[in-house]
Image (cartoon, rainbow, N blue to C red):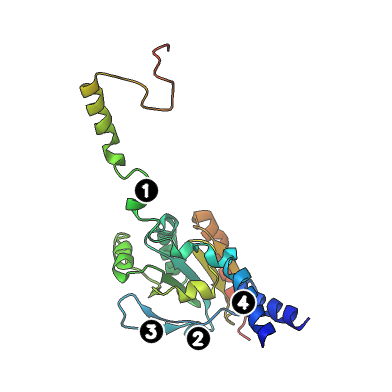
Amino acid sequence: MKKLLSFILVFLLIVGCSEILTRVKPYEKEHFADPKMTLNILEGRTEHEGHIFLIREASAGGDSTFQGGCGCR
Amino acid sequence: MKYLLLYSLLTFFLFAEVNVGDKAPNFTLKTLDGKQIHTMQEFKGKVVLLNLWASWCKGCKKEMPEFITLQKQNTKDFKLVAVSLDDSKDKASHFLSTLKQKIPFTVLHDSKKHLAKAYSCSAMPSSYLIDKNGVIQQILIGSLNHNDIKVLQEKINALKKKEKR
């Protein structure tokens, strides 16, 4: 009995961590697909925010990964 | 040795998948309006394309008009059964209403995802081509475009010609 119980325990430990149980299934991704789950929820406002920043700070460049904003280009 | 066999058996059931040549798992599901109940059994004798979709899946939206055409072209011995895996029926109904076309195929709702589990759905959308005897003949993973549907039509025609055992 003790052997069987320990077997079940080991089985549950091994199988419980298996990828097939822990992975989010494709049909369970409804909430991930929600627009509010995007990394930048203010995506639509980014351009507007950039414009305001440019006017208020009187600065340009350095807000993208393209070029460094050193003014050498 | 006894435990090893037991472990193998349990693992086999856990990882069991639906494959081509397997009997299509049965289901009993309600339509989107909740008025009718359909089972896999009642489609026996017809070639069935079982499609698993959801309103939040972009690929599903893309292939839906193709499915409408496919069902319209195959009125005899063919049934397209689209099963929505949305949590809410309203989302699925809204999705279909945006297509602005009359849906000629059967639309069922499986909020508990029992069917997706039974068919071991590995991607959204997924479609299963089932012959007249209820045997899975093809598993189509991902969104189907116009050319895919053309190839599928040939396969459906071939399956329609086969007699029911």
Quadrant of residue B81 in the image? bottom left
Query: Is label 2 or label 4 in front?
Result: 4
How dense is the environment of label 2, judged by Cα within 10 Å: few (below 14), some, or many (20 and up)? some
| Residue located beneath label 3 in the image | B37
Q: Is B93 left, or right, of B159 in this rendering?
A: left
Q: Give neighbour class at mark 4: few <14, some 14-19, many 20+ (Cα, 10 Å).
A: few
Query: Mark 1: which secondary structure?
Result: loop
What type is the residue that disc 2 sits on?
Gln
Image quarter hosting the C terminus of chain A:
top left
Above or below: residue B119 compared with residue B154: below
Q: Residues within 10 Å of mark 3 (few under 14, many from 20)?
A: few
For the residues carrying marks 3 and 1, which lies nearer the camera in this image?
Answer: 1
**Which residue in the structure is indicated by mark 1?**
A38
Residue B62 pos. (x, y %): 42, 55
Q: Is residue A15 above or below residue B27?
A: above
> From the viewer's perspective, is the residue at label 1 or at label 2 nearer?
1
Image position of B31 with respect to B153: above or below? below
Q: Residue drawn 40% across and 60% down?
A: B65
Q: CA distance from mark 4 to mark 3?
A: 41 Å
Look at the image and tell me whether residue B77 can be seen: yes
User: What residue lies at 49% left-to-right and 62% top-to-bottom?
Assistant: A24
Chain holding disc 1:
A
In three-dimensional space, the C-alpha distance between marks 3 and 2, rounded to whole angstroms, equals 12 Å
Chain letter, disc 4 residue: A
Question: Counting other residues with Cα less than 10 Å from the Cα at mark 1, is it few (<14), some (14-19), or many (20 or more)?
Answer: few
Q: Chain of mark 3?
A: B
Q: Position of residue A52 (x, y in %)?
A: 22, 28
Report the disc number at residue A1: none
Q: Which mark is residue B41?
A: 2
